[in-house]
Image (tube, coloured by chain):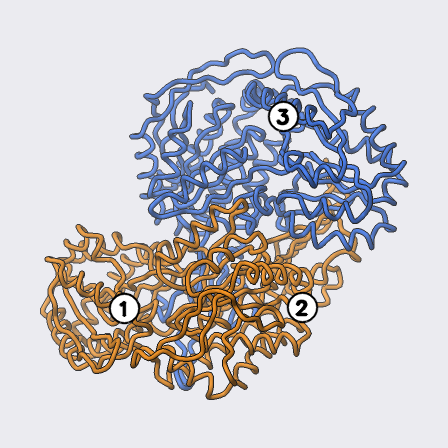
Chain colours: A orange, B blue
Amino acid sequence: MILEGKQIIGQDIAAGPGTSFQAVDPANGETLPPEFPSADGKQVERACQLAWDAFDAYRETSLEERAKFLETIAEEIEHLGGGLIERAMSESGLPVARLEGERGRTCNQLRLFANVVRAGEWLDVRVDPALPERTPMPRPDLRQRHIPLGPVAVFGASNFPLAFSVAGGDTASALASGCPVIVKAHSAHPGTSELVARAIQSAAKKCNMPEGVFSMLFDAGYEVGTSLVKHPNIKAVGFTGSRKGGLALQQAAQSRPEPIPVYAEMSSINPVFLMPKALEARGTDLAQAFVGSLSMGAGQFCTNPGLVIGLKSPALDSFIEEAGKALKDTPANTMLTPGIHSAYEQSVAKLAGNTKVNEVSRGLTGEGENQCQAGLFTTQGADVLADESLQEEVFGATSLVVICSDMDEMKRVAEALEGQLTATLQMDEGDTDTVASLLPTLERKAGRIMANGWPTGVEVCHAMVHGGPFPATTDSRTTSVGSAAIYRFLRPVCYQNLSDALLPEALKEANSLGLKRLVDGKREG
Amino acid sequence: MILEGKQIIGQDIAAGPGTSFQAVDPANGETLPPEFPSADGKQVERACQLAWDAFDAYRETSLEERAKFLETIAEEIEHLGGGLIERAMSESGLPVARLEGERGRTCNQLRLFANVVRAGEWLDVRVDPALPERTPMPRPDLRQRHIPLGPVAVFGASNFPLAFSVAGGDTASALASGCPVIVKAHSAHPGTSELVARAIQSAAKKCNMPEGVFSMLFDAGYEVGTSLVKHPNIKAVGFTGSRKGGLALQQAAQSRPEPIPVYAEMSSINPVFLMPKALEARGTDLAQAFVGSLSMGAGQFCTNPGLVIGLKSPALDSFIEEAGKALKDTPANTMLTPGIHSAYEQSVAKLAGNTKVNEVSRGLTGEGENQCQAGLFTTQGADVLADESLQEEVFGATSLVVICSDMDEMKRVAEALEGQLTATLQMDEGDTDTVASLLPTLERKAGRIMANGWPTGVEVCHAMVHGGPFPATTDSRTTSVGSAAIYRFLRPVCYQNLSDALLPEALKEANSLGLKRLVDGKREG
């Protein structure tokens, strides 16, 4: 498939009149054809108008029609074959196995949401039947369902060019909820974006979806994204990226005449707590596994273990020594973009320059451009408590081990943490009581708490929470991974005394969708 | 019970060192004893510290303990007897029957939430069991529950001194979710507030709840409220009141280092659509019922029908004439406060002064202070489309009838409306097709859509939505009335591979709470 470098606006493919940009292969710094001219205000307007025009029709497509559309998107992405993977490799520097895995995850995610749509739990149907005989006042018939918010603007992430980009989690969950989607393509992987957008466009056509159900716009700068977030037709925003970027979008959304929700998944350093018994029993294994998790994909994961917290002890000394050794031999990996690489170098230099921080070791330097040299540092618990900058995210394969003088200090460090996507416990049975006393703090701090795993690797399922208190996200009540992500784009509507003829299918007396409704507060079996 | 005019801080009763204020009987303008000295910064700090200290313990009380606490609050309020009603009458000008009804609603609401807590649906328990044999990667055991956000600041409403104040819907749903509550008492009914706060304080003691589960502070101005919203221990805000007040709190909450959600229920004019067949068949009855709904409680309801929309026709002319006649004989009622009365007079004068608006009639003027003289006005559909100020809420018994030239204009007027709590359809069977074409717009505009009722009167049940798009509320994804209000104060947490010993009760394998969990995406029967 030949890349055209054009906007996807409904069923149109339209050249952008704005400034052009090109992708760069981070492995060698070479510019990749073609040029991608930015969209202009008219094209933003056109995409938003089409999305608005599509909204009422799209949100009332049957559950089966909508599910089929999501499945067809997955098929169309699979039909792109090796060309998609090749382009994504050139644009991201990520290896083939990783990208093939990510494609699988992207398509599985679309199919998961197809099944979520069919199951209809997300409609949250509630029925309080009329009580005409009640005194002093009869009760009317009251029924509730959830409806989608409206067109959603999605901003893809650079670190998941497939699973968190054009057809990623935000798009899949928004489309599943009944919201049209307009993607602002990430400028790091425009070719990958175009291929996937054309797959969605093709699926929309095959499934006879209203034209404006999906559009995608390119931009060399920030204008298109800001215009989208400020457009009155846009009713919610999905974003994965930096804290700065997320907060800028949140600010723009809040300053609209009608503020709208922004779901920004931003920054997290994912503390790992090394509990004493586990550390004593298997410190060496933990050190190896830790370095594996830290350096995977050049550490470019939202859930990268950027902070490791242990108690001052010979076992912790050994752990640090072993991890340092393992890290020293860790090969450098190409980072996603020159910008990410230079930000990483600056962040590591800042950390290393902190007088309270000691370097344990650095990884191999690697050859070629934009190589991520891993790093391991230590500091003391008291220093973390005194210096907030030690909690700043270093996006890449660098981690800071925090040495706490005792359990009490470990708890105070936990309590001083900002909001996190994850908190990890390395523990043995003998640590159970200590962990139990730490858990309430971790629950208040993180969206996901795990034992004896590593935070990288986020399962796409029903119980997943990829979210957490600020600044991990802008809305701790939600998740951006897993089936519950659909709830971000829904709101409840109550229907009082409407005739069966006027009620939406999900609320009609016949319950033809076979939903397990909440009737008078009780869940139907 | 003698009023002391003191802050309720945990189990303490503490004199405030700040500026004093007193309640005013709006019926005669007289000042009511005692004085209520405002809290100071130290007392805010003390209440927030107590709430924080109580949080981890309170959120892990058993479902039964928490339900009993809510029920005990209801009992303690009932034990206050006639003294509560008398004081509320003096402070609000509302009649005894209304306040007795409101007390019933307040206690029923607490008992409803007790049952909601017991049923445990709000925990939204999800289990994705481990798949150790899955290739290429095994799946870990993943479980999700919802936990409360943290201490909540509640701002009561003047128009519901019981049901939307100290022990009202926000407090009941926040306590039900496991959040401690700090109320900023409404300065219009401080005595009523003190009585109810002491009932809650007593219930907390009887039920052995952690001390900081509830506090209430007085303030003559805005300082205490702002300090509460900005305090790092506060994690969410519930508010019912004016758009200006709600937006100020939203602004304060968003400018915190850690922004928090604000659930502000603000302004709504609750459009009523008079469909042609219904208007022809029973215009006179509709006119009578409309004026009844409009003038009830001096129109001081969030769901007051402030806008009536019909098609230019002899039937609409008759409706206007009949409504005008009925309104002319409508007695004036005392408004809640002198401030509300003077704002009402100004808003009516502004409306009447609009050159596109015609007066149909005014109600009786009444004797005594702060009397609400009802008002009925008309304008044309084209004028509403051209002038946004015609959509401004007039808080009180005044409504504007919009005469549309045809169905197309009615739809455009509907489309031009701001977000609303309710939209009402007066319709007969012959109007069904017309209504069907209007419904998608109303769904996008309102939280509740009703046929052949009146928006005043909000049922407290499971399917209720008392919410809606901005500016009806700051968060259209929620409701402030009904059992679903609990979801405002919760967030999901995922537990990965935690041992059964460490899992919270709701997630343990045994499912001792008997919850209908979502297992692998399927609801247990």
Q: Is residue B448 left or right of residue A224?
A: right
The answer to whether the residues at label 3 and label 2 have Cβ atoms under 8 Å apart is no
Within the image, what quadrant is residue B305 found in?
top right
Q: How many labels were placed on the picture? A: 3
For badge 3, the amino acid type reads Ser
For badge 2, the amino acid type reads Pro
State the residue at coordinates (54%, 24%): B84
State the residue at coordinates (82%, 55%): B433
| Mark 3 to mark 2 CA distance (whole Å) | 44 Å
| Few, some or many residues within 10 Å of mark 1 (<14, 14–19, 20+) | many
The answer to whether the residues at label 3 and label 1 have Cβ atoms under 8 Å apart is no
For badge 1, the amino acid type reads Pro
Q: Is residue A69 left or right of residue B428?
A: left
Can you name the residue that lies furthest to the bottom here?
A82
In the depicted structure, whether residue B212 falls above or below residue A424 = above
Badge 2 is on which residue? Answer: A210
Given the image, what chain letter belongs to the residue carrying mark 1?
A
In the depicted structure, whether residue B184 falls above or below residue A428 = above
Given the image, what chain letter belongs to the residue carrying mark 3?
B
Residue B347: image tag = 3
- Could you tell me residue B222's position as x and y percent? 41, 28
Badge 1 is on which residue? Answer: A305
- First in sequence, mark 2 or 1: give its number: 2
- Could you tell me residue A229's position as x and y percent? 50, 55
